[in-house]
Image (cartoon, rainbow, N blue to C red):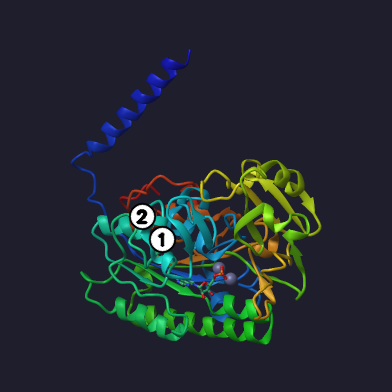
Amino acid sequence: MRLPLVRVTLLAALLWVAGCATTPASAPPPLEPHGVVLVSIDGLRADIPGSGRMPTLDALFAQGARAAWVNPSYPTLTFPNHYTLVTGLRPDRHGIVHNDLEDPVLGRFASKKASGRDGRFWGGEPIWIAARRAGLKTATMFWPGSEAEIAGGRPDHWRPFDGTMTADARVAEVLGWLDLPPAERPRFITLYLEQYDVAAHAAGTFSPQALDAMADVDAALATLVRGLDARGLRSTTNLIVLSDHGMADVRTGDTAYLDDVLPESLFSWSSLGPVAHITPRPGHEAEVTRRLIGRHDHYTCWNKEALPAAWHYGRNPRIAPFVCQSDTGWRLQLHRHPLPARAVKGEHGFVPEDPQMRAFFVASGPDFVPGVQLPAFDNVDVYPLLAHLLRIAPAPNDGTLDTFAPALTPRAGSAH
Ligand code: AMP
Ligand code: ZN
Ligand code: ZN
């Protein structure tokens, strides 16, 4: 009964491909894509834009196409989510399943150490690879993954991450790229700003330090917008500003110790914090299952095969057999591995359904309808949007461009 259906589907697919290949001679030539500048403000929660704290971001929010919020992918950490934004793949599929992980063959990956720049850990194909293949120049003013050689290449311009480089200096670099002659000018540019994330971790979501960081980041955004205006590039450049996840306040001492329920001799771990990856030592699988699975004070543990379906997480071999997730505000540690001495007052990595973990999205420029509010969407949808704007064929991904249909302007020669 199933074969004929498969044949019909195959035939339809072949006819569709043949139709695409025989473009009528009268069809208009494909248009050059507009430029795309993708800005990430790490950790900036969905309720901050439009709240009066960041005037430039507020203005973009009022005038641009914005989302009610963006659902981050699981786990709500920086590297998994930034790489999802540029691949459209869930962390389970692109393989950056945590900021720090253990690959059964490659060994340890620590996002902020040298192993984080080893391309073998990064699966899928970041958007800058397809853009380069299409003959477009690309540049990253930092972005997780941009320092590694992935799928055979890197962006045309990239820099090793340096947290001491100010937001203003980063914007100056971006504007410098926009000053290149048209043939050399990058068509796709990223700008990564972690100042808010750093301040909120250290001092809390609305601490004076976090408010200062918001002001710095906002001033840098203002310089970027003015720079686009001054170069006459506003009408040919799509500016997307978004975040990877939100941020929640945590109280010192709100720590749950895994070894209170499970003696350390029974297991090893590859990550702790809001999301812990636990592997039983050989011969202790049954006991670890009995003691760990289920609800505990301030956290829950699952077998990796039984994690909530909405998280799309658990199939990748880099995910340990057991995953524990803390409640918002709590962290998972071991007595022998207490939290680092530095204070932690803000944190993310909590469940993506928590409104505090929501990210934001706003886009303005020639391909966007001003003033549209889109319903909330999953961050895997950003990649097909980038591919659409750059007029390149998206690689297989977990997102959909349909999300943005109400916000995209029709363009000659475009599907929209
Ligand atoms: P986290 O808050 O632990 O999820 O990670 C965010 C932090 O990662 C930022 O505050 C930066 O300090 C750091 N970071 C971001 N991008 C990079 C990168 N490309 N290389 C190394 N560290 C980075
Ligand atoms: Zn982050
Ligand atoms: Zn962070």
Residue at 42%, 65% in the rendered image: 115
29 left or right of 362? left
On the image, the x and y values in percent for residue 395 come to 37, 47
Question: Quick one: which residue is furthest to the right in this view?
Answer: 297
Disc 1 under 8 Å from ligand 2? The reply is: no
Answer with mark 1 or mark 2, whichever residue precedes in sequence: 1
Please give the residue where the numbered disc 2 appears in the rendered image: 411
> Depth check: 380 or 252 in front?
252
Residue 43 visible to the viewer: no
* Secondary structure at numbered mark 2: loop
246 left or right of 187? right
> Depth check: 353 or 349 in front?
349
Q: Are marks 1 and 2 in contact (CB under 8 Å)?
A: yes
Between marks 1 and 2, how big is the CA–CA gap? 8 Å
Q: For the residue marked with disc 1, what is the amino acid? A: Asp
Please give the residue where the numbered disc 1 appears in the rendered image: 367
Q: Is residue 230 above or below residue 37?
A: below
* Secondary structure at numbered mark 1: loop
Q: Crowdedness of circle 1 by 10 Å Cα count: few (<14), some, many (20+)?
A: many
On the image, the x and y values in percent for residue 80 come to 52, 59
Q: Is residue 138 above or below residue 27?
A: below
